Amino acid sequence: MPTVLETTDLGLAHHVLSTAYGKLAISGVRGPMRIRLSRDDLGLVELHRNSFAMRFTASGPPFGRFSIGRLISGEMSHRIGRHEYRQATPGEVFVASNPDQELHATVCHSDAEFAILRPELLAQVAATAPGRTARALRFTGDPPLSPAAAAAWSSTLDFVRDNVTTVPAVQSPLLHGAAARLLAATALSTFPNNSVREPTGEERRDAHPTTLRRAVGFIDDNAHLDISAADIAAAAHVTIRTLQLAFRRHLDTTPMAYLRRVRLEHAHRDLLHADPATATVGAVAARWGIMGHSRFTSQYRAAFGVTPSSTLKRSR
């Protein structure tokens, strides 16, 4: 559940905002102040919702995070680094910050949501090769690639809020990790960025069956932990690109899809042996990092031919 601050004390709000976004300078405050700040912490991602019944300008140095915004209502203009100011309209999604760029924003009676993503998360999801020199990942444009891409970001953000952050019983580290990676992957497909890189010849040569066996063994032994593609690649002693090539070449799937299948099988076994009087389908799904009841039911039926609730009712 979120941490919430509601206040009319600008000093207190300034302190909380500076804690979240780095040392901010706030100026040009106009009108009576009413502020509501909400934060959900998923580990490598934080989800913020900031509501201001006032007008002000904020600026600050780089704070080392990516930030993706969605304006719900009101007015907001912003710029990243030395780019020109850009006015957001209600419903619009936008890149609010790259990790190494200054922040500048003017807010007027706005209600907005922000996903704050750590650089290491996006690097993992973008499959940046570990142990190699590479340029820092960044978003190269503010607007989404297309209206469909913008809609995908909004629906993913809503999905995570509805199925992870607003459900008190859902405190599974696996689920939080899966939600964080889903948001990162969606951000990379929504906004232009510099993450695309072709595999090298060495990476193609290393995508052999021994690599696959190491990776599969690691996944099978650690599916109960919040592991990423970077963790699997490290265990197999290869880059993430090589890992992806090995799974595609030999199993026609991806490392994370294989991990999801292993977790689904664990959930199936848990349901088979659960006590229907005390266990719930939702709790089992959350334990194995599977988000959303309808999604779990669909995946489960496709894999096992029945619904998870049917399996639970027949369990002993």
Image (spheres, rainbow, N blue to C red):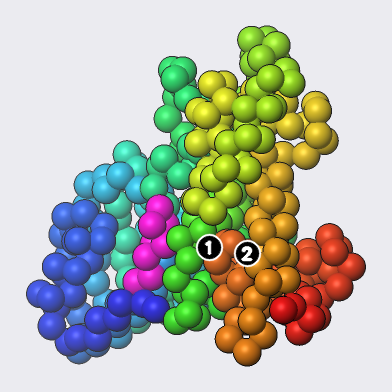
Q: Position of residue 185 (x, y in %)?
A: 59, 49
**Secondary element at image label 2:** loop
Residue closest to the eye, 285 or 198? 285
The quadrant holding residue 6 is bottom left
Q: Which residue is mark 2?
A: 290
Q: CB under 8 Å between callouts 2 and 1?
A: yes
- Which contiguous range is marked in magenta? 39-46
Q: Residue at x 68, y 72 (%)?
A: 273
Residue 165 among those drawn in magenta: no
Using residue 174 as the reference point, say whether residue 83 is left or right of it.
left
Q: Which residue is mark 1?
A: 175
- What kind of residue is marked 1? Leu
Q: Position of residue 89 (x, y in %)?
A: 51, 70
- What kind of residue is marked 2? Ile
Q: Residue at x 65, y 76 (%)?
A: 274
Q: CA distance from mark 2 to mark 1?
A: 6 Å
Residue closest to the eye, 127 or 214? 214
Disc 1: CA contacts within 10 A as few (<14), some (14-19) or many (>=20)? many
Q: Position of residue 311 (x, y in %)?
A: 78, 76
Q: Residue at x 45, y 81 (%)?
A: 168
